[in-house]
């Protein structure tokens, strides 16, 4: 039985009939306090044993206690912690006396009294029937005196129905995939006596949405990412997936792999690296490696892209002329504007001369072409009359030509040009910056006293003299046909990692925005970020125009999904967190990170257990179409992925190839 078929069977469950079967859904207590947010109930040891334990986080159903009452309504609550009973002080006093008496035995009445305890629960919402449809509301419409209610622990079959109930109810169809099983606690002696309860997710929850995976290293984040990648690929494998009445086109997926664990075989993943599972995945690397495409630019051809990359790499340089270099804009002017075109061509030629001087090879026979003037060629200045740039000159000649211009820029014919053109200079500010960069001279006539083009030399390893398209365009094209792209950034320094990631994200966003404004069809593209705290804007970042903030705010309308993983929740921009719909939260070891998490949804119910338990794959899960958080054990990503026959909801689990479901 497939996961889809197993999930579809849940639609046949009658929640209200099932919860009224005491042999399957045992009673765990009777409420003595109830309001719109909180329920407190009286329980005892016997009821808890019958229910195989009531750990923190347990889901309970509270219905009307009168068996003759046929109202199909049940309040869903989550067990939080013990709560005091009015008789507790007397019970404690009696226990102390009993301990002091030594070997004396308890009478039956006292033993019974000692077994009672109170539990405090969070009200999550109400299941109710409307016509023939079961609905769930995230609150209580009305509550009566607590003595009217009875609290039961759902049977495994009924629990499966509850945790997989979504906004549209439990429905069959594509997109549903098993993610794991319900898990309430790290200790599982009593839970082992009950059947495993599978938890499914809808892949549609991830498409174009924001998904966060928070937890310490080696607590299951990467394993969960692989499950999402797998679910996304499986969604379109059958070709029948639809969304809003339209067929879902092949979904592009790109993984920004900071540690190289998705792009390379490694011992800790035991053959489950994504590239090993999907032969059609394309791998890119900053450095040349077998099996990888190299992320290099031809800086001489991709002027704007190459300059943007250099500007990012020089962003920490505070020198005035370097800031001016970073600020140059390479917008191609209208061809009909001859003056602007002439100035643009001069800037390009001088910039390429800078690249050439810094060791960015353009290949044999490469030339530049731009307009000079007769006055300059006939000025008698050495080096300016020997060649005519309009006919094309080599980069060596271009470097010498612009050096001669800057050396004599405060003399005629350049001074005369300014006087005869209403104060407009022959060279605009950007060209003067480039000549300063090329000659390493702050002012005309001075000696070389700056680093200039030498600042570019350390980055020439990012350049290739090939004439193909830029890797950014190649990657965007692959994503648009539904490919999986893995960008291995493990061999780059943090500055290079951020630069390449920012540039790629910008290229994907720009392509999506272009398609959106031109009303052009676009497929979904899912973007995955490991170690997101190294890439995303910091918590106190106020610039909402940064690419990651724009992806968080505008990505959904552009069909761009964001999946990010980190152990430093507090470092992530609030703008991104506020726009996140899906949450996978595992062990976090300090209160600062947990304080950030508990701001969202009802994660405050789990902060103590999240800090205390560090089991791999023990996740608290909130998805977009599910109203409440479900504690689960994520299944381990399997190799090869296959499904065994299952006994149906609440029955046997899918085949695991002999590997326990303990996360990765």
Image: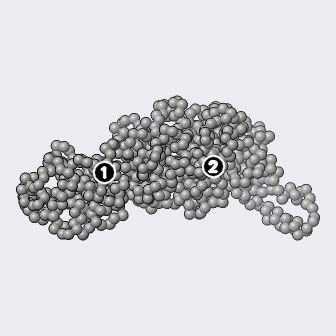
Name the residue: 31% across, 62% down: 455
Quadrant containing the N terminus is: top right
Decide: is 463 above or below 241. Answer: below
- Residue annotated with mark 1: 299
Task: Report the side of 188 relative to 252 (left or right).
Answer: right
**Farthest-out residue, right:** 104
- Residue annotated with mark 2: 663
Name the residue nearer the viewer: 131 or 410. 410
Name the residue nearer the viewer: 440 or 40. 440
Q: Is residue 343 visible?
A: yes
Name the residue nearer the viewer: 135 or 8. 8
Tag shown at residue 310:
none
Residue 536, image quadrant: bottom left
**Farthest-out residue, front:** 364
Name the residue nearer the viewer: 589 or 58. 589
- Circle 1 or circle 2, nearest the eye: 1
Name the residue: 58% across, 57% down: 216
> x%, y% of residue 529?
49, 51
Name the residue: 18% across, 58% down: 400
Task: Report the side of 91 relative to 272 (left or right).
Answer: right
């Amino acid at each position: 039985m497939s996961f889809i078929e197993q999930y579809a069977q849940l639609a046949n469950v009658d929640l209200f009939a099932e919860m009224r079967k005491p042999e399957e859904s045992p009673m765990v207590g009777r409420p003595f306090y109830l309001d719109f947010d909180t329920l407190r109930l009286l329980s005892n040891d016997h009821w808890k044993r019958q229910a195989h334990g009531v750990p923190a986080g347990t889901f309970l159903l509270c219905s009307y206690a009168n068996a003759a009452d046929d109202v199909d309504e049940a309040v869903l609550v989550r067990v939080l912690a013990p709560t005091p009973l009015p008789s507790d002080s007397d019970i404690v006093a009696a226990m102390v006396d009993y301990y002091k008496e030594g070997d004396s035995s308890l009478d039956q009445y006292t033993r019974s009294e000692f077994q009672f305890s109170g539990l405090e629960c969070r009200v999550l919402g109400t299941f109710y029937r409307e016509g023939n449809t079961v609905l769930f509301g995230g609150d209580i419409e009305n509550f009566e005196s607590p003595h009217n209610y009875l609290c039961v622990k759902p049977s495994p079959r009924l629990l499966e129905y509850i945790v997989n109930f979504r906004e549209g109810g439990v429905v069959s169809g594509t997109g549903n995939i098993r993610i794991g099983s319900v898990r309430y606690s790290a200790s599982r002696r009593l839970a082992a006596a009950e059947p495993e309860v599978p938890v499914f997710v809808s892949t549609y929850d991830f498409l174009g949405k924001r998904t966060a995976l928070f937890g310490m290293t080696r607590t299951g984040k990467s394993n969960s990412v692989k499950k999402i990648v797998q679910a996304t690929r499986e969604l379109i494998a059958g070709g029948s997936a639809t969304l809003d009445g339209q067929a879902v086109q092949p979904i592009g997926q790109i993984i920004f792999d900071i540690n190289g664990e998705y792009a390379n075989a490694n011992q800790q993943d035991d053959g489950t690296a994504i590239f090993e599972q999907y032969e059609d995945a394309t791998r890119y690397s900053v450095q040349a490696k077998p099996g990888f495409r190299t992320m290099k630019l031809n800086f001489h051809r991709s002027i704007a892209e190459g300059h943007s990359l250099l500007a990012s790499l020089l962003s920490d340089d505070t020198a005035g002329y370097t800031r001016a270099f970073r600020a140059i804009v390479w917008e191609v002017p209208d061809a009909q504007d001859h003056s602007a075109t002439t100035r643009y061509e001069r800037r390009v030629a001088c910039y390429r001369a800078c690249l050439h001087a810094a060791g960015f090879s353009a290949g044999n026979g490469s030339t530049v072409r731009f307009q000079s003037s007769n006055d300059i060629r006939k000025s008698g200045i050495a080096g300016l009359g020997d060649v005519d740039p309009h006919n094309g000159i080599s980069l060596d000649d271009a470097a010498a030509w612009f050096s001669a211009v800057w050396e004599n820029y405060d003399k005629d014919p350049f001074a005369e040009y300014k006087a005869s053109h209403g104060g407009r200079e022959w060279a605009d500010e950007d060209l003067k910056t480039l000549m300063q960069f090329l000659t390493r001279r702050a002012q005309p006539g001075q000696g070389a006293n700056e680093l200039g083009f030498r600042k570019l030399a350390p980055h020439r390893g990012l350049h290739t003299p090939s004439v193909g398209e830029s890797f950014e365009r190649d990657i965007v094209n692959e994503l648009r046909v539904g490919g999986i792209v893995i960008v291995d950034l493990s061999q780059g320094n943090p500055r290079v990692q951020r630069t390449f990631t920012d540039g790629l994200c910008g290229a994907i966003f720009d392509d999506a925005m272009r398609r959106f404004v031109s009303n052009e069809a676009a497929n979904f593209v899912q973007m995955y970020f490991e170690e997101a705290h190294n890439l995303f804007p910091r918590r106190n970042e106020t610039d909402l125009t940064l690419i990651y903030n724009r992806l968080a705010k505008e990505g959904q309308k552009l069909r761009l999904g964001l999946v990010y993983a980190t152990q430093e929740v507090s470092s992530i921009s609030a703008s991104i967190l506020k726009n996140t719909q899906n949450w996978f939260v595992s062990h976090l070891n300090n209160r600062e990170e947990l304080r950030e998490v508990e701001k969202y949804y009802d994660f405050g119910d789990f902060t103590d257990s999240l800090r205390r338990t560090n089991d791999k794959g023990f996740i608290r899960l909130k998805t977009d179409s599910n109203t409440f958080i479900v504690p689960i054990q994520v299944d381990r990503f399997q190799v090869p992925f296959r499904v065994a026959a299952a006994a149906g909801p609440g029955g046997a689990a899918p085949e695991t190839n002999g590997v326990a479901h303990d996360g990765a």
